[in-house]
Image (cartoon, grey):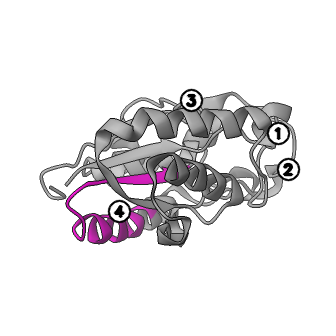
Amino acid sequence: MKILFVRHGKSLANAALTIGEPNTPLAEEGLEQARVTGQDLKGENVTLIACSPFIRAQQTAEIIAGELGIPIHDITIVDELHERRMGDLEGGPKIHETEYFYQNDTEHGFEPQAELIARMQTALAKVKGLANQTAGATVVVGHATSGFYFLQVAKGRTRFQDFDPVNQMNNAEFIEVSLGAEHA
């Protein structure tokens, strides 16, 4: 089973240095990034794409699907892949350092870490169920913060204090998901 995680292309919120909301679409640069990522994935034998329900992830997934010749109607939305809820900061300017969005637990009404971890465990189980149905690679299109948690959960980590140091993926970057022994 091969799973590749892709962070969505640059969104209008990323470009404006604001905290994205669910309906934030891709910027022009993000559309091009997604196209390039789709081309870069051509050698990976991708046969299945799953994505977050947020529009920027769906747009990225659709562009990648187009580059790979996968019908758009075959993309599977996995609701649990949505970005971390960031409470009253959503839609506002990014006034905190990047690490804050990963490390904060509940300040400003953030989705608690324990809930985010549980949600990513559910997302991973759904993605693995999909990946088991295909002989090729599965691409998962998601977000920076929830994606980091997804990658940590895939390694078998269930507590934030056991996570790797925060490492934010670039827009439209992809990485192979390392599955821990219990997930392999």
Mark-to-mark CA distance, 2 and 4: 27 Å
Q: Which mark is residue 138?
A: none
Location of mark 1 (residue): 18
Location of mark 4 (residue): 124
Q: Which mark is residue 170?
A: 3
Left or right, 21 with reference to 110: right
The image quadrant of residue 109 is bottom right
Q: Give the magenta part as a residue range.
A: 120-142
Marks 2, 3: nearer the viewer: 3
Marks 3, 1: nearer the viewer: 3
Residue type highlighted by circle 2: Gly
Q: Are marks 3 and 1 in contact (CB under 8 Å)?
A: no
Spot occupied by residue 60 in the image (x, y as percentages of width and height): 60, 49
**Dot 4: what SS?**
helix
Q: Is 20 above or below relative to 27?
A: below
Q: Is 129 above or below relative to 157?
A: below
Mark-to-mark CA distance, 1 and 4: 28 Å
**Quadrant of the drawing holding the N terminus:** bottom left
Q: Earlier in the sequence, mark 2 or mark 3?
A: 2
Q: Are marks 2 and 1 in contact (CB under 8 Å)?
A: yes
Residue type highlighted by circle 3: Asn
**Dot 2: what SS?**
loop
Residue type highlighted by circle 1: Thr
Residue 79 magenta-highlighted = no
Residue type highlighted by circle 4: Leu
Q: Residue at x 30, y 41 (%)?
A: 44
Q: Residue at x 61, y 66 (%)?
A: 53
Residue 123 magenta-highlighted = yes
Left or right, 182 with reference to 64: left
Q: Earlier in the sequence, mark 2 or mark 1?
A: 1
Location of mark 2 (residue): 91
